[in-house]
Image (cartoon, grey):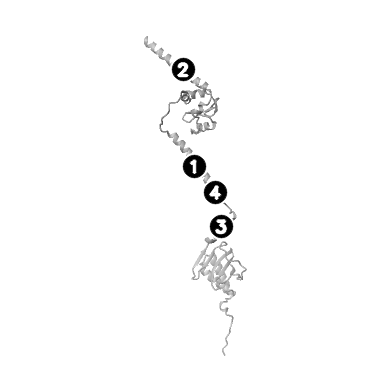
Amino acid sequence: MLVVAVGPANAQNRLDSNQTIQLALDIYSGIQRSTLPGSVAIKIKKLLESRTYRCTRVSEYQVFYQRPNLATLKVKCSGNRTYGLTVATNGYFAVYGGDGMLAPINQRDAVVYSIAAEGDVTEITGIDLQLGKQETEARFAAGGEFDYLYLGLIVLVIAALVGGMIAVFIRQWRKKQGRKPRQRMKPMKKFKMATSSALKDQLLLESKRSAKYVHYHACGIYIAVGKRGKRRLFLSKFWAKIYAMFSLNFYEATEMQLATLDLQSVYKAVELAAERKALKEEHVAVDASSDDGF
């Protein structure tokens, strides 16, 4: 007599407990050791089928949560909704989902391993271009967390300030190196006297010390002495101190500005000193000629 036993159609896919435990251990170790995703996907498919879950082919999976002794995966099989799979180091495993309970795989949660129909494996580690564009547009519409327009304006302002300072120092450096000779108009006596050394000497005699190497005259003029001993006249104490400290000539008093000040007494003192010097030189010359006569 011939006896035929007929069982369920999927009985050939069912595994014993030892085999399922081994599959769970292989999946966990494969995740820890970064085994080829294709081989891990095959073991996931077998473990799902051992619990009567339908899985024709694992199209992609994601290690959603991982601890030293436990790992939770999201699995997507072709034609089915997302499954959840938890495997542990002691061989424990649990399969759930497939009925819409789990949210679809999100590329922003963790690395997604996608297995092509031909068996090729591709790794998706970030957001695709279209999704990135949508998020960027949404951020601009909502105001964003940071506005790069203000950052650009700040950079431009700082660059303009630095450029202006460099231009000023280059101008002063070139001015300090020397100027090209230029034609000068014959000035009037008052303007010629305004920049003479005799006038500066007289101003220093009548001035009081305001700061180191800076003197102040009652008519409103500051006399600053530079590093090389040159004396210059300023109407501002600040620029006088700058010249005394760094020998940088900013806003020196012009002859036209000096002409507007009350310097008549100074001019007279300079003229008297010049006359006395001329008379002294004349007397010396007369004495010398008389000595030669004898």
How far across and down, in percent of the image, does residue 48 sit?
A: 58, 72
The earlier-in-sequence mark between 4 and 3 is 3
Outermost residue on the left side: it is 293
* Residue with the mark numbered 4: 151
* Residue with the mark numbered 1: 163
- Classify residue 147 as left or right of residue 274: right
Q: Amino acid at mark 1?
A: Gly
For discs 4 and 3, the disc positioned in front in the rendered view = 3
Pointer 4 and pointer 2: residues touching (CB < 8 Å)? no
Q: What label sits on residue 263 in the rendered view?
A: none
How far across and down, in percent of the image, does residue 151 sit?
A: 54, 49
The earlier-in-sequence mark between 2 and 1 is 1
Q: Amino acid at mark 4?
A: Leu
Q: CA distance from mark 1 to mark 3?
A: 36 Å
For discs 1 and 3, the disc positioned in front in the rendered view = 3
Vertically, is 89 above or below 133? Answer: below
The earlier-in-sequence mark between 4 and 1 is 4
* Residue with the mark numbered 3: 137
Name the residue at 37% across, 10% down.
Answer: 293
Q: Amino acid at mark 2?
A: Glu
* Residue with the mark numbered 2: 275
Q: Quadrant of the C terminus?
A: top left
The earlier-in-sequence mark between 1 and 3 is 3
Pointer 4 and pointer 1: residues touching (CB < 8 Å)? no
Name the residue at 50% across, 40% down.
Answer: 164
